[in-house]
Amino acid sequence: MRYLMIILVVAVMLAGYFGTPEGATLEGIALHTPGAGIAPAFVKFVPDMLSIAIVIYVVTAGIGQQFRFVNTKYWLVFGALAVIIASGCLANQEAPGPIINGMRYYFRAIPWFFLPAVYRFKDKEIAQFLKLVMGFALLQVPVAVWQRHKTAALGLWTGDAVVGTLLASGVLSLVLIGVLCVLAGMALKGRIGKLYAGFLFLLLVVPMSVNETKITAVLLPIALFATALVGAAPGNRLRVSLWALGLLVAAGAIFVPVMDYYYAVNVRGGGTKFSVEAFFSDPKVLQEYLEHKAPVGSTKEAGRVDALVVPIEELSKDPIKIAFGLGIGNASKSSIGPSFTGKYQRVYGIYSTETSFATFTLEIGILGVLLVLFLHWLLFLDAVVVARRDDSLIAPIAVGYAGVCVTVIAGGFYTLCHPSDAFSYLFWFSSGLIAARRQQLAIASSSRPREPIRHHRAAAATPLRIGGGVR
């Protein structure tokens, strides 16, 4: 099973990159990436094919084990979500094509959530997973710098074309913030040295600086402090918070000057980008960036506020639609073909392509959105328990998961992240590791309440080495 895990990480980080031709248009900007397009287009579907194999394994092994390591609360939430989705499809008499497209983007990564509940990954295998993810995260540094250089040479004064190997600028930043949170969790749990973690931290700030993702300046501090609060011992939180603050100051020393430099370049090139200072100090600049007042059905680019407010206003005219949405996939464009594109995509496409939560609101309604938020809350609570009670290699992942939850929720309001392979697969597999471990701890605690809970003691006592870093 670990080989499938390795193939998955490689596929979600590289398949779309190698399967997208050089010069292909992404968000209206041509992709200029070394190595792009060297693989046939069908490699982009490797993660989907892996999910089919995992479904077969999970069902077969899970039935034999009676899914004892899947907590009932998750069955209830996923079951309720399935009812809401089915209700939305029936109420809107949705065609099969958009349903298939929607199911693919919403649920293709979910089998990986259940995999750790039926197959117990050893610490050695989890360490391989973490090293692979870190390796591909570090790969984004030279690729992002190259993309910024290449697009600037072509006269494109924007960071939107800096997508790394993940094919979306916002997703690149969100994934890297999640990696930084887990890296901080590893340092807090003593798995790697803090100086080495700080060095990796500063390296991974570079792609988020050259792609001008402004949400980084807000999201990274919140995510890092959430990680610090969960991972620090009660009497050690002040020292850990100061350590986190020091990292953020050092990151800011990279992030702000780089973004301001490209702001000056944008202005000289006739662009209208904002400096970091103006973006956070001038309400007019912030409003201009977030709210474009794009009307329904227009071709005008929608802002983040438009994507949040307009779908709610429109669906509120019909109580069924505001509750259950327009139907899964019914407001989205499909990469498979026009017959799989939703019938409302032309009307609401400027919002559904802007942020994930705009898509969720349009397609699964307010009830669906509330369930998604509740699911993340349950995962967060499980992560806190695992972070404080476990001694396996899943514990530092759980520590970082506090920041990951912030990243995922806020990221859903900022950009379109759920269709991303890297974002969705890495999130759901990590969530599955934590949820399954939480259930294992609960079962062990109920059967042996006075015995300390241990898991792979020898491996847990060994610091994780990533490229030479040691405790």
Image (tube, rainbow, N blue to C red):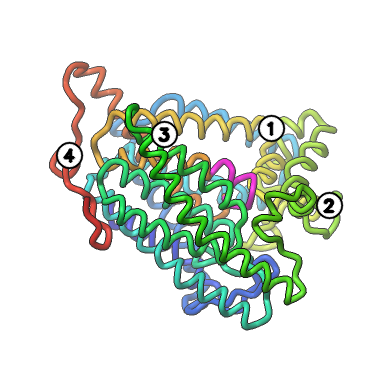
Q: Which residues are magenta?
A: 408-417
Q: CA distance from mark 2 to mark 1?
A: 22 Å
The secondary element bearing badge 1 is classed as: helix
Q: Which residue is mark 2?
A: 294
Which badge, 2 or 4, comes first in the chain's sequence? 2
Closer to the camera in the image, 284 or 44: 284
Q: CA distance from mark 3 to mark 4?
A: 26 Å
Q: CA distance from mark 4 to mark 1?
A: 43 Å
Q: Amino acid at mark 3?
A: Leu
Q: Which residue is mark 3?
A: 229
Which badge, 3 or 2, comes first in the chain's sequence? 3
Residue 456: numbered disc: 4
Q: For the residues carrying marks 3 and 4, which lies nearer the camera in this image?
A: 3
The secondary element bearing badge 4 is classed as: loop
Would you place residue 197 above or below residue 434 in this image? Answer: below
Would you place residue 89 above or below residue 447 in this image? Answer: below
Which badge, 3 or 1, comes first in the chain's sequence? 3
Q: Residue at x 32, y 53 (%)?
A: 130
The secondary element bearing badge 2 is classed as: loop
Q: Which residue is mark 1?
A: 366
Expressed as whole percent of the image width and height from the top left, the position of residue 442 reads: 30, 23
